[in-house]
Image (cartoon, grey):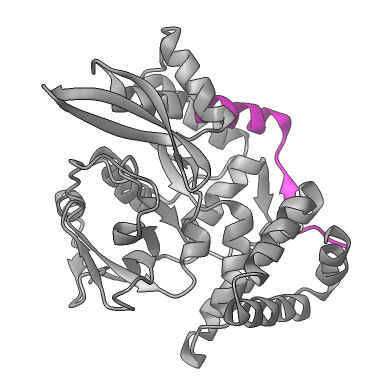
Amino acid sequence: MTSLYRSLPASAQAAFSGLDVATRQRELERCVADLPGGFTTKVVKGRTYWYYQLKTQPGKVSQIYLGPDEPPIRELIASHRDGVRLAGAQAIRSMARAAMEYGCTAIPSAHGRVIDRLSDYGFFRAGGMLVGTHAFIAYQNHFGVRWVNGAMTLDLDFAHAGKNLSIAMQSDVRVDTRGALESLQMGFIPVVSQTTYKKPDEPDFDIDFLTSVGRSGDAPVHISALNVTLQPLRFMELSMESPMPATVLLRSGSVAVNVPRPERYALHKLIVSQLRPAEMRHKAVKDIAQAAHLLDYLLTEDADLVADMWHDVLARGKSWESKLTAGFSSLCRAFPDQGFDERLAKAS
């Protein structure tokens, strides 16, 4: 059986690990630097999340969302409390260049500019997520691997829970997402729905803003606090639940973002592949390919994680079950040499 990924050398993994820590330390500092307050936690739907709490005016308290209660967040908070000196911008650029030289994968420059600018404007600190192919690319450095076939597209996909937000954000959050894109002066123009931005001189370079379907169905949802309009998609909540922090490697440095958990992303891609119309068959092929690369890695390194997520999705109802099993059948036909059916059965 030929693996769909190759492990990066130890030097690359070490270089990216250092960059990841420095990037997220810097982002934490951007959130709370010079603000009087302290760290606190909340339990939301059975999960614990960290916030930085501060008094904005007499009698009023604001909270800045930091992330889920997991080792990376706890380590960053401990470093902040201990007064650990953070790496400067120049040091991070040097670390990023070193990571690329050792074999880590960087986001294309034009795409990196968009991600970086949304970060500057606070999109990810306000709960925004990087989804789609660019999250798939980011998983490589996170795992210390390189995919055999990247299955790239030029679309940039972002998501936010919007009105379906399950993590309580600070009530006074304001992010000018549209202003961030306009400030780039790259020529992006919103389409009629306002959920997609197109670049006339690069027809394949679209920016989409997505969310999960709520009470209003699939009608676009405008979130005034973020100055963005989101397109609801069926089954999107699978990728959006319990996001994880990640570092995106750019040629000019790095950006701290939120991405779907890889096991959720993989199974979501199997489901989405069954929703594509005939004229978007090429995207369905990409969905299956990305799911295959992730599942090849995850079933090798953490099969129990995949099995638990598989049973979680099956328990969501007949529609979820039928789409997932159909997508998995397509996966097994497209990648017969990987033995996905036997590997999943063994994990379950």
Left or right of residue 263: residue 170: left
Residue 135 position (above or below residue 29): below
Q: Tell me residue 158's x, y (percent).
A: 37, 58
Residue 165 position (above or below residue 120): below
Residue 56 position (above or below residue 180): above
Q: Tell me residue 247's x, y (percent).
A: 48, 38
User: Which residue is at 51% across, 53% downward?
Assistant: 260
Taking depth in this image into account, of 90 and 274 the one nearest to the observer is 274
Quadrant in the rendering for residue 105: top right
Residue lying at the far front of the rendered structure: 59
Count of numbered badges drawn on the protein: 0
User: Which residue is at 51% across, 92% downward?
Assistant: 278
Residue lying at the far bottom of the rendered structure: 278
- Magenta residues (range): 1-20
Residue 53 position (above or below residue 160): above
Quadrant in the rendering for residue 310: bottom right
Magenta region includes residue 70: no
> Is residue 169 in view?
yes
Magenta region includes residue 4: yes
Q: Tell me residue 99's x, y (percent).
A: 56, 32
User: Which residue is at 88% across, 68% downward?
Assistant: 342
Taking depth in this image into account, of 345 and 250 the one nearest to the observer is 345
Taking depth in this image into account, of 312 and 327 the one nearest to the observer is 312
